[in-house]
Structures are given as C-alpha cells and as structure tokens.
Amino acid sequence: MATIVFAQQFHEKREEVRSPRRIALIDEKLRLIASFPGVGSSLLPSYMRRSYGPEALRVVAGAYSIIYEYDRLRDTVYVYDLLSSSELA
C-alpha cells in the first residue's frame, strides 16, 4: 500500500464537506488510491494539467474529484486537491 501525503488545500476542502455519506465515499476512494495508485484517470482538461502537472490523475468520488499524483520510486501518493463538480464546470 502506497504512503499518502495530503496537501493542506485538500484537508481544507474536505473539512467543508458536511455530508457523512460523501465523506465516507471520499475516504473509500482514498483507500482505493492507496491500494491501487494507478487507478485514476489521466484524462484531465488542460487547465488542470497546468495547475497540477503532467502526471496528475483524477478519481471521481460522487460530486467530487480527488486530484493526485503517484511517485512510483517512492511508492507515495501526493493528494493535491478535492474539487467539487461546480469547480469543474
């Protein structure tokens, strides 16, 4: 299982999520990412590539997207952001 390092921005946005069901889904997706870091989609809009880099991946968790990068050499996942569907529009 990969080590996960969270950006402060991710923590701040996760704290804003009020629905226990949505929090549980986000946490479930984080466990999936830790177990299978390559599970995310690399198909990101160009503005996301500019913001998060060319190796960024995205996993959808209901109304949210978890943006992260996997460093294979360190077996570490860097979780950058949690975007709501309204931020993706």
Image (tube, grey):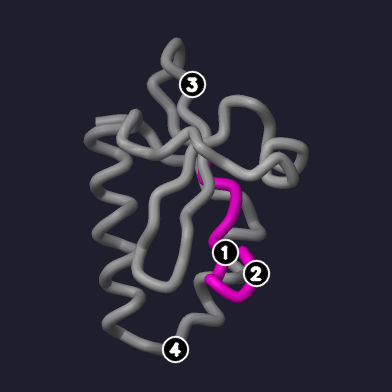
- Picture layout, residue 18 above or below residue 52: below
Task: Determine which residue is flagged by label 3.
Answer: 71
Sequence order check, earlier mark of 4 and 2: 4
Q: Which mark is residue 83?
A: 1
- Picture layout, residue 42 above or below residue 23: above
47 to the left or right of 68: right
- Picture layout, residue 69 above or below residue 32: above
Mark 1–mark 3 Cα distance, whole angstroms, equals 21 Å
Q: Secondary structure at mark 4?
A: loop
Residue type at numbered disc 2:
Glu
- Circle nearer the viewer, 2 or 3: 2
- Front-most of residues 31 and 5: 31
Residue at the far bottom: name it.
18
Q: Which residues are magenta?
A: 78-89
Q: Are marks 1 and 4 in contact (CB under 8 Å)?
A: no
Residue lying at 24% horizontally and 31% vertically, measured from the top left = 1
Residue type at numbered disc 1:
Leu
Task: Determine which residue is flagged by label 2.
Answer: 87
Q: Are marks 4 and 2 in contact (CB under 8 Å)?
A: no
